Amino acid sequence: MDILKITEDYVRNLLKDKLSSSYSYHNLEHTIQVVDKVKILSKEEHINPEDTENLLLAAWFHDVGYIVDCENHEEESKKLAETFLRQYQLDEGRISKISELILATDKFYKPKNHQEEIIKDADLYHLASDDYFRIGENLRQEIKEVHHQKFSKLKWAELNINFFAKHQFYTNFAKENWQPEKEKNVEKILAKIKTLKQEKKEKDNLEKDKALLNKKKLEKMETPERGIETMFRVTLSNHTKLSQIADSKANILLSVNSIIISVALSTLVPKLDAPSNSHLIIPTFIMIMFSVVSIILSIMSTRPKVSSGTFTRKEIEDKKVNLLFFGNFYKMPVDEYVWAMKEMMNDRKYLYDAMIKDLYYLGVVLNRKYKLLRLTYTVFTIGIVVSVITFVVAFRNVTL
């Protein structure tokens, strides 16, 4: 009975049929590689035939536990091996040794004898393999698929270099023949880390440049908006100041003409009953009339014009109401006004049109104010001049 051949056939079929395809590293390919390296080490380390056979049996079984439990696969591999070997009536002493060799493949296990050193070195031979980077990538993908842990290429290379630093080969043959190849792989990993760090730095710089460029583009896109907002704000401020100036000038004329009329009524008019003052009637009347006209014009320039104060939903939907002027909404319920304002704010064109119309009508009001104010000053000036002239003529006629 060739137990090795029977075991090989059994393990090959078991891994092909029951092992998940997610195991891209701990699979039949890895198992065959470990078996091959056990053969080499057993020969080079001069291991007797029985121990060699034990090592090979352990190598075939050491990862079959992955079909049951990836977290505790060594223990599961041991159970499957013991069950299988007992079916073929293998000696219990040998079964015990094979079980111990399987458990020795745990990555944190420190070998206690020569046979454990051999299977330990064979299991991690890939660290010295020319194909190390492909095998390592398979392990990274397996961890991603099975354990749901993702590592970037840089992080993976750094984890690998840390593992290399802690790892050691135990057998003389491995130290002499595999260690130099392992050190070459270390140099390759370090070079790769350097390259990946440089690429990451360049990528980060590129991302920063992109972010800065996007920020500048956004600022350029926002600049017209800010310019428009500034234009509206400055123009509205200027309109408001001009309106205040006009009102202030009208108030001055109102005050001056009110004083003139008060003085005339209290001082001149009571004296006009006397025949000796009859010459003052016409100049006083002219002065009072011009002052009254100036007061009326001043009041007209400051007199506000208020609209109906209501609107309909159809007018809002047709964008016919300027909600920025209080005269168009002061009689409306607050709910209707809030709804209308939200409708306007959701429509950029409507909002801008309303702001433009608001500025336009403010300009119309200012034009009316300043025209009336100009006329008021003209009337006031003419009235003062005419009043003075009539008073002078009246006094001159009296003197003559």
Image (spheres, rainbow, N blue to C red):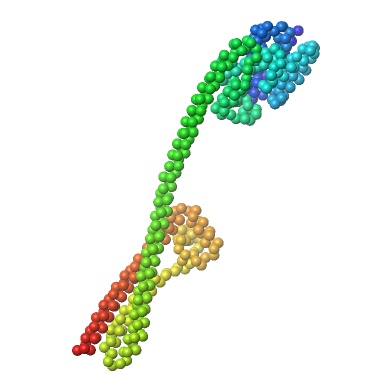
Q: Residue furthest bottom?
A: 275
Up/down of 177 relative to 338, above or below:
above
**Foreground residue, 162 or 319?**
162
Q: In the image, is 103 to the left or to the right of 215?
A: right
Q: In the image, is 85 to the left or to the right of 256?
A: right
Up/down of 68 relative to 2, above or below:
below
Snapshot quadrant of residue 171:
top right
Snapshot quadrant of residue 41:
top right
Q: Residue furthest left?
A: 400
**Foreground residue, 66 or 400?**
400
Up/down of 286 relative to 167, above or below:
below
Q: In the image, is 378 to the left or to the right of 11?
A: left
Q: What residue appears at the point 50 percent right and 25 percent down from the top-left corner?
A: 195
Snapshot quadrant of residue 367:
bottom left
Whether residue 215 is visible here, answered yes or no, is yes
**Foreground residue, 103 or 295?**
103
Q: What residue appears at the point 32 percent right and 91 percent down from the top-left corner?
A: 273
x and y percentages locating residue 5 in the rendered image: 71, 10
Q: Quadrant of the C terminus?
A: bottom left
x and y percentages locating residue 250 in the rendered image: 36, 71
Total marks shown come to 0
Q: What residue appears at the point 32 percent right and 81 percent down from the top-left corner?
A: 288
Whether residue 11 is visible here, answered yes or no, is no
x and y percentages locating residue 1 in the rendered image: 76, 7
